[in-house]
Image (cartoon, rainbow, N blue to C red):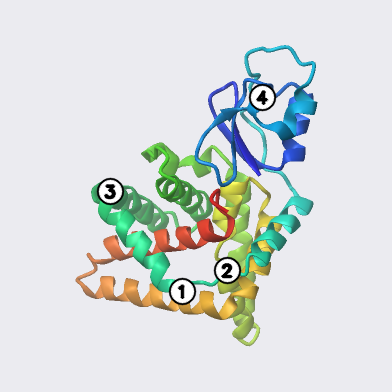
Amino acid sequence: MYKIIGGDGQQYGPVSAEQLREWITSGRANAQTMAQREGDADWKPLSQFAEFAETLAGKPPAAPLPIAAATPPSSGTADAERMAQEAIARDYNVEVGSCLGRAWDLLKSDFWPIIGVSALIMILTGTAGGLLNGPLLGGLFCYYLKKIRKEPATLNDAFAGFSNSFLPLFLGALVMGILIWLGFLACFLPGIYLVVAWQLTLPIIMDKRIDFWPAMEVSRKVMTTHWWSVALFLIVCALVNLGGALLCGIGVFVTWPLTMMALAFLYEDLFGSGK
């Protein structure tokens, strides 16, 4: 998987090598386009990637052409299936302590900006009646993932869910809410299963730019293989937040960002750029 910097200065991806070759062929990327291979720290021109030499051959050097700024999220059923299988194949162990520990270290390293942004999103999700929770939480995950990846992160990133993937995030949160509610009505247990299974849907939509249903399926398939561990993870996070709420309600402004970032670390371990 690869990321590139388009001619408009925006970052695109992760995308497969096949998709990137299509962009080169269609003139959306060329030899000077800066790219980053998944797992690498450095950005390099595409001309330095041997796997694209044949596709780039014969193309004259020119300024990178911008990818359309309004590139919609891919419905990507095939990509979603591949993404799920790759995550399952890693045989990852969900380590609650590791996720919370790394989240705490990150929170301490940039305490007030993270607390301020998180508190704002938490208040907005509480006052929007749940209607905008998808875009709001998707943007918050974008902000956290940039912090985790040591990329510049600003308040604008926390609201990126309104400019990138708004409809998939909105529909994802809405459909999940309805189906989970129906699951609780149906003997309760299906609802519990779905709460755990769909935990990573919003960060998948936001980070991988795929539609809401394929993202829900990716999350469900991967989380099902770790269901009991993820359920324990969520129980521990709930207890942490309960402890924060008991501290006159103020502590939750620290515990909620902590547990949300722990979930972002879980996502990064399974799907992120370092994998």
Instruction: Tell me the residue that label 2 is attached to.
Output: 92
For this view, does 184 lie left or right of residue 79? Answer: left
Measure the C-alpha gap from mark 1 to mark 3.
Answer: 24 Å
State whether residue 253 appears in this view. yes
Q: Which mark is residue 234?
A: 1
**Secondary structure of residue under mark 3:** loop
Give the label, 4 or 3, closer to the camera: 4
**Secondary structure of residue under mark 1:** helix
Instruction: Look at the image and tell me in which quarter the N terminus lies.
Output: top right
Q: Amino acid at mark 1?
A: Leu
User: Which of the two labelled residues, at mark 4 and mark 2, occupies the earlier sequence position?
Assistant: 4
Q: Amino acid at mark 4?
A: Ser
Instruction: Tell me the residue that label 3 is attached to.
Output: 110
Rendered location of residue 90, percent (x, y): 63, 65
User: Which of the two labelled residues, at mark 2 and mark 1, occupies the earlier sequence position?
Assistant: 2
Measure the C-alpha gap from mark 4 to mark 3.
Answer: 37 Å
Q: Which residue is pictured at 75% across the width and 27% down the height?
A: 53
Give the label, 4 or 2, closer to the camera: 4
Q: Does the residue at mark 4 contact the one at mark 3 (Cβ under 8 Å)?
A: no
State whether residue 67 appears in this view. no
